[in-house]
Every structure is written in structure tokens, then in C-alpha cells.
Image (spheres, rainbow, N blue to C red):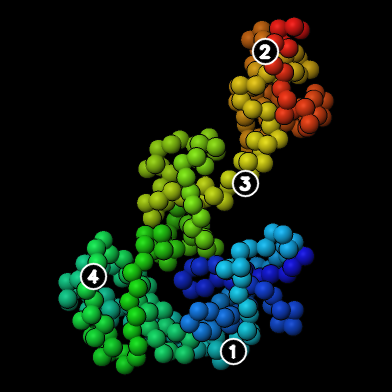
């Protein structure tokens, strides 16, 4: 088993990092990790242990450099205040120049050497004059980065239709491919308006819950198959996944719900559930 910790950053992104035992990191601790542009400060969200075969992709593994001390946490709070001020200044400059862009968030580099402004726009924006204005105010290097609607949702915490904070902003998503096939496999309506999240794309929870549905469908007989029960032979008409029950219509018309565990234990056993009774075998009986 490999010990890991999951780290979340201010932008909402979550990454898995190798846990150095000497650091004794606990949930809620702040630490510095290696990043593409230098050290980044993040917070430990949880600890976990995974077998080597189930490790995340190498691109999601980072090295923990050191644990943050009290002075560094004080500096972080100061940067957060500066980021709020920079956000207001930049937003005012965008309105003054009437640029077709929407400011989303601001990030100060750990050493204060760079300020990055994240924005969305429907078209390409010429923001060179805006960069000059901001550089004159802050006297440091300025970067403007255009992001997509899914990154915007991750950086803007909102409530989803479940009345909880959206997945991408609460625990960070890697934006894996999401398809309507996932909604179909979870017996959801294929109404894209109801399946869309705050970003307008398919909701991330379709990915998070998919493994549960796949496991349940692996254990249960297929809809339309014929199986033998203690009450006789019938046809599977519906799966009640959350109740772990199978709805069966018997040959003489009676409909009953049988717990999946009972089917596995008293009728066929887990191995025979994958080979339901065929129509020919049923007629022979």
C-alpha cells in the first residue's frame, strides 16, 4: 500500500501527492508542494492508502516539499486580502475599457512575483492595454489567462441541484469525459437541461456515481432476462438499485420485488445470475 494525501488549492483543484512520513501531515494542515511555476501552498483534505496498481496517473502525483509554518500562513491571509483588492481594480479597468470579458479570479504567486488574472470570454480579446494598466498599478509581472466554462465553475462555488456545493468547486474534479451514456446507464432522463451543471455541461456527479451503478448492474440480472425464483419463473422488468431489489413479473402475471441478496443466496447463486433462464428452457418447464 502506498500512502498518499489529497491536497486542495485556492483555485479548487485537487491533486494527490506522495506523503512523506517525516512530515506527519494531518487533515487541515498546510504544506508547500512542487509546481510547474515553483512552490504552491495547499491544504491537506484527506489521507488515504492505495495499492500500487490503483495509483492515480503520474501527472497527478506531486512531491511535498515542506509543511507551512505560522508566518507563511499569515502571509497567505495577507495575499488573500491583496487578491480581493486586485480583483476589484482589474474589474474596474475592464469596465472602463469596455472589454468583452468576465473576470473570474485572481492568484498571487507565493513570492509575489506574479499576479495571474483568470477570465472568460466568448471571443478572442485584445487585453494588451489592460495588462499595461495593471502593471502600472501593481509594479509586478501580470498574466491574463482565458479559461473555459468548466474551469469557471470550479473557481466559482455555487450550489447544485442537490442543494450542496458543486463537485468541481468543493473537492476538485479532473474533468474526465462525461457522456449521455452514463446518464442512460444510471436510468436518468436524457433531458440535457436537467443533466447540465452550472457550467452548462453534463454534471460531474455522473462520473462519480458511475462505479456504483456498474457494480450493482454487474451483480443483478439484466432487464428482460428470465430467471427462476422460489415463486416460479418470471421476467426481470426493473432494477431498484438503491434498494438492491429486482422487480420480477411471473409467468401468470404476478409482480414481486425480490432482494438481490436473496436471489444470490437462495435461487441461483452469484455465478448463475449471469446465465438467466432462456425462453426455451422456460417453455420446457
- For the residue labelled by badge 2, is the local secondary structure a helix, a strand or a loop? helix
Residue to which mark 2 is pinned: 279
- For the residue labelled by badge 3, is the local secondary structure a helix, a strand or a loop? helix
Residue 94 coordinates in the image, percent (x, y): 22, 75
Label 3 and label 4: CA atoms lie apart by 41 Å
Which residue shows up at 73% across the image and 63% down it? 52
Residue to which mark 1 is pinned: 70
Q: Residue 125 carries which label?
A: 4
- In this rendering, the answer to whether 255 lies above or below 29 is above
Q: How crowded is mark 1: few (under 14 residues within 10 Å), some or many (20 or more)?
A: few
Q: Quadrant location of the C terminus?
A: top right
Residue 73 coordinates in the image, percent (x, y): 55, 86
- For the residue labelled by badge 1, is the local secondary structure a helix, a strand or a loop? helix
Q: How crowded is mark 4: few (under 14 residues within 10 Å), some or many (20 or more)?
A: few
Dot 3 and dot 2 residues touching (CB under 8 Å): no
Label 4 and label 2: CA atoms lie apart by 65 Å
Counting residues from the start of the chain, the first of labels 3 and 2 encountered is 3
Amino acid at each position: 500500500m502506498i500512502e498518499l494525501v489529497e491536497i486542495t488549492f485556492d483555485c479548487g483543484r485537487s491533486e494527490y501527492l506522495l506523503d512523506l512520513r517525516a512530515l506527519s501531515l494531518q487533515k487541515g494542515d498546510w504544506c508547500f508542494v512542487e509546481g510547474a511555476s515553483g512552490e504552491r501552498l495547499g491544504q491537506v483534505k484527506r489521507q488515504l492508502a492505495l495499492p500500487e496498481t490503483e495509483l492515480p496517473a503520474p501527472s497527478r502525483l506531486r512531491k511535498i516539499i515542506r509543511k507551512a509554518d505560522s508566518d507563511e500562513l499569515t502571509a497567505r491571509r495577507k495575499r488573500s486580502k491583496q487578491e480581493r483588492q486586485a480583483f476589484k481594480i482589474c474589474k474596474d479597468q475592464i469596465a472602463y475599457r469596455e472589454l468583452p470579458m468576465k473576470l473570474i479570479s485572481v492568484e498571487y504567486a507565493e513570492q509575489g512575483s506574479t499576479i495571474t488574472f483568470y477570465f472568460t470570454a466568448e471571443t478572442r480579446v485584445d487585453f494588451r492595454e489592460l495588462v499595461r494598466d495593471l502593471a502600472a498599478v501593481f509594479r509586478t509581472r501580470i498574466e491574463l489567462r482565458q479559461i473555459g466554462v468548466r474551469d469557471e465553475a470550479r473557481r466559482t462555488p455555487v450550489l447544485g441541484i442537490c442543494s450542496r456545493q458543486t463537485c468541481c468547486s468543493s473537492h476538485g474534479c479532473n474533468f474526465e469525459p462525461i457522456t449521455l451514456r452514463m446518464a442512460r446507464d444510471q436510468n436518468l432522463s436524457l433531458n440535457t437541461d436537467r443533466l447540465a451543471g452550472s457550467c452548462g455541461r453534463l454534471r460531474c456527479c455522473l462520473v462519480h456515481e458511475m462505479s456504483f451503478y456498474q457494480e450493482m448492474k454487474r451483480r443483478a440480472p439484466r432487464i428482460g432476462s428470465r430467471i427462476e425464483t422460489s415463486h416460479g419463473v418470471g421476467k426481470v422488468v426493473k432494477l431498484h438499485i438503491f434498494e438492491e431489489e429486482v422487480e420480477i413479473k411471473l409467468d401468470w402475471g404476478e409482480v414481486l420485488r425480490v432482494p438481490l441478496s436473496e436471489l444470490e443466496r437462495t435461487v441461483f447463486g452469484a455465478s448463475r445470475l449471469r446465465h438467466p433462464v432462456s425462453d426455451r428452457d422456460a417453455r420446457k418447464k
